[in-house]
Amino acid sequence: MEIGLFYAYQFPETPPADGFDWDLQVAQWGEEYGFHEAWFSEHFTVGYERWCAPELQIAAVARETTRLRLGTAANLLPYHNPVALAHRLMQLDHMTRGRLMVGFGAGAFPTDAQLFGTELLAQNHEMLAEGQELIRKIWATKGEALTVKGKYFQVDIPALGELSLGGHWRPYQDGGPEIALAGFSPASSTIRDAGTRGDIPMSIAFSDEYLASHWSAYSEGAASAGLTPDRRKWRVVRDVIVADTDEEARELALSGPRRRMYEEWVIPQNLKAILHMFPGLKAEDVTVELLAHSWIVGSPSTVADKLVAEQESSGGYGSLLLYNFDFHDEPEAYRRHLELLGTEVVPAVTERVKRLLAAR
């Protein structure tokens, strides 16, 4: 099992420059402690999930790290010209020397759709499907002309001619960066679509039950396309908190910036999904303490035990991605959490999973 960061949360009152410095510091710690990758989200009108240009964050982080793979999670295609985005990502692929991964999404917030004048439910998923197909075709060209006229987007790349005029751009990675598609709901259709292409499945999962349904959907998609699903590609985004003792970990999980973020943003924003996950509950019953039952919290040995159990129950996944929280005013406990995860928990889990596989 490898480990990575998933950048989503930041408080609206944090000055953007300070927030970016914090995110950069976390990425540097992550590389120091053996993290494998970092994914950067994109929203435009969401104060608690602020960043709107993941490519700029990646370009900056790439200059301060050497090993972390870096991904957009996700570029929201209804809010881009896919021709421009395809070229911007090709340039970034070169600037990172092939460390780039790319996620595509439709967008989930009505306020973003309002900003760009799209109809969230009526148009966005069609625009996602059309836009990503166009980008894949652009990345596959090797100097020949490409003309595509779709419902929402079009491109007319001239063949490469004299003086290098025409379609001269190629990705650094042959065929382009790996593409990820994220799913939130049980048995996600987006995860199934990822399976039909062999893309990276990214599970935003509250529970092990979500994980089981996501892998089933991904496998069904792969089978429909004659592909063999690879569990090493599977990314799982989870709430995991580690400290030197179980008591310290619980305190870190339930206090300070994490509690604020859940009470002010995560619970109100996801209340319907949470109530679906816990049938019979009322809205006023949903608390941080309730949700903590689905988190993985504890000392290194406690968390390692829980992650090994999750690997077994889910059938195994390749990478665990951790939400990054806004601890810029009180960083030390959060730094220690990252250190323990990277230097103690992951090596222990990896060794134990290897032994389990060998025993089979």
Image (cartoon, helix red, strand yellow):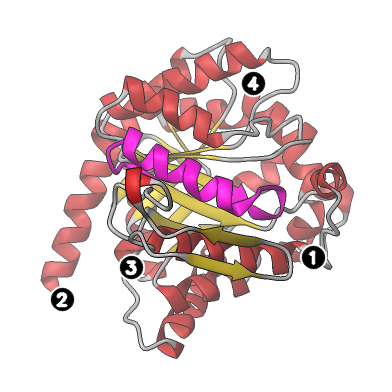
Q: Is residue 165 above or below residue 152?
A: above
Question: Mark 4 vs mark 1: which is more N-terminal?
Answer: 1
Residue pointed to by mark 4: 256
Question: Is disc 2 placed on a helix, strand or loop?
Answer: loop
User: Which residue is painted at 46% across and 55% down in the image?
Assistant: 236
Residue 328 versus residue 334: which sits nearer the camera? 328
- Looking at the rendered structure, the kind of residue marked 3 is Arg
Question: Mark 2 vs mark 1: which is more N-terminal?
Answer: 1
Residue pointed to by mark 2: 360
The boundaries of the magenta stretch are 75-100
Question: Is disc 1 placed on a helix, strand or loop?
Answer: loop
Judge depth for marks 3 and 4 and give the one in front.
3
User: Which residue is painted at 15% across and 76% down in the image?
Assistant: 360
Residue pointed to by mark 3: 231
Residue pointed to by mark 1: 123
Question: Mark 1 vs mark 3: which is more N-terminal?
Answer: 1
- Looking at the rendered structure, the kind of residue marked 1 is Gln
